[in-house]
Image (cartoon, rainbow, N blue to C red):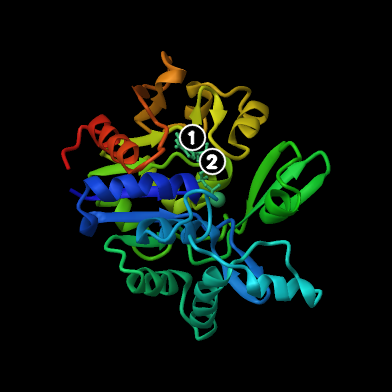
Amino acid sequence: MNVTVLSGGVGGARFLRGMSLVVDLDNMTIVGNVADDIEVLGLHVSPDLDSVLYGLAGLADDERGWGRAAETWNALETVGDLGGESWFRLGDRDLGLHLVRTQLLREGATLSEATERLAQSLGLRCRLVPCTDDPLRTFVETPAGTFPFQTWFVARGHRDDVDAVHYAGAPEARAAPGVVESIDGADVIVITPSNPYVSIGPILAVEDVRAALERRRVPCVAVSPLIGGRAVKGPADRMLARMAGGTSPAHVASCYPGLIDALVIDVADAPAELSGGVRAVVTETLMRDDDARRRLAQDVLDAAGARA
Ligand code: GDP
Ligand code: CA
């Protein structure tokens, strides 16, 4: 059974950890978001791809929720002491990965080639592919102005309300090699419990990815990132309230029109009435440990009528 998963960063990585416990990894392809990517200190950082890499390699810091476990911050401290750019938090271990990725890119590798190399070195058995190798960047429009994603998210602590998001580069972006093929060849398509606007939205903004999803003949199941109408972490609930008009399962589903067949929601959000023939599937969606993650992943496959 071939499974293709569209994933954001932290919520995506937590969920994928569960998927990795219930599916045959050789047949799983992850399509990752790259619209959060940023150049820091001359290095190409891909925060969402890295969350997935670290999560699946067992290197993630579960408590902090991002970056690597047993991290230290000596390099960044030096950067700060020297008056360098230190607002974007990069740990020493994390920096090692960005050095290698950046060198590969400088030598002419595409982002998907560099990602494949990193995934292989970290022992990942599934495929991780960026949604596109072309530049694709999220910008948020707020009452205080329009900001690049990381300026709003990290530097401004996502305190500004968001009126709209746009994805620079989306009209020209082509799906990275293997992305469309993996969607066309999937038996099940899954959208992780990620921010619909800034993690999944950019992936769907790549025209040939969206088209592949629209013509699917297999179930696509999304998992809601909200529990009881609230984000487990981050600004997804505030964004939905302001841009979709609410934080119910119907509002989450409205972010994926014509693209999903079922939405997995938490018991705290049930019952839910969804339009467009989308089925609500109720379970416990808080991924507090591997056990909970495994159960959620299995529930998602069951919702798709798939047998792993
Ligand atoms: P980012 O790219 O690192 O911001 O991560 P994602 O967009 O992939 O995930 C962020 C979303 O994950 C947030 O909206 C959270 O509400 C959601 N999330 C985190 N942990 C959980 C969980 O245990 N269960 C559910 N349902 N959602 C979660
Ligand atoms: Ca993200």
Residue 38 drawn at (x, y percent): 63, 64
Left/right of residue 93 with respect to residue 58 in the rendered view: right
Mark 2 burial class by Cα count in 10 Å: few <14, some 14-19, many 20+: many
For label 1, the residue is 225
Instruction: List x then y, in percent, for residue 231.
Output: 56, 33
- Say if disc 2 is inside 8 Å of ligand 1: yes
Which is more toward the observer, 68 or 165?
A: 68
Give how far across and how far down residue 241 sits, in percent.
64, 26
Q: Which amino acid, by three-letter code, is at mark 2? A: Asn
Q: Which residue is mark 2?
A: 195
Q: Is the residue under label 1 in contact with that under label 2 (CB below 8 Å)?
A: yes
Q: Residue at x 17, y 48 (%)?
A: 1
Ligand 1 within 8 Å of the CB at mark 1: yes
What is the C-alpha distance between the residues marked 2 and 1? 7 Å
- Can residue 78 be seen by looking at this rendering? yes
Label 1 sits on what residue type? Pro
Q: Residue 201 versus residue 194: which sits nearer the camera?
A: 194
* Residue at x 32%, y 43% (from the top left corner): 189
Could you say where residue 147 lies in the image, as x and y percent from the top left? Answer: 75, 51
Q: Secondary structure at mark 1?
A: loop
**Image quadrant of residue 81?**
bottom right
Res. 204 in view: no
The C terminus appears in which quarter of the rendering? Answer: top left
State the residue at coordinates (40%, 31%): 285
Closer to us: 80 or 218: 80
Q: Residue at x 51, y 22 (%)?
A: 228
Q: Which mark is residue 278?
A: none
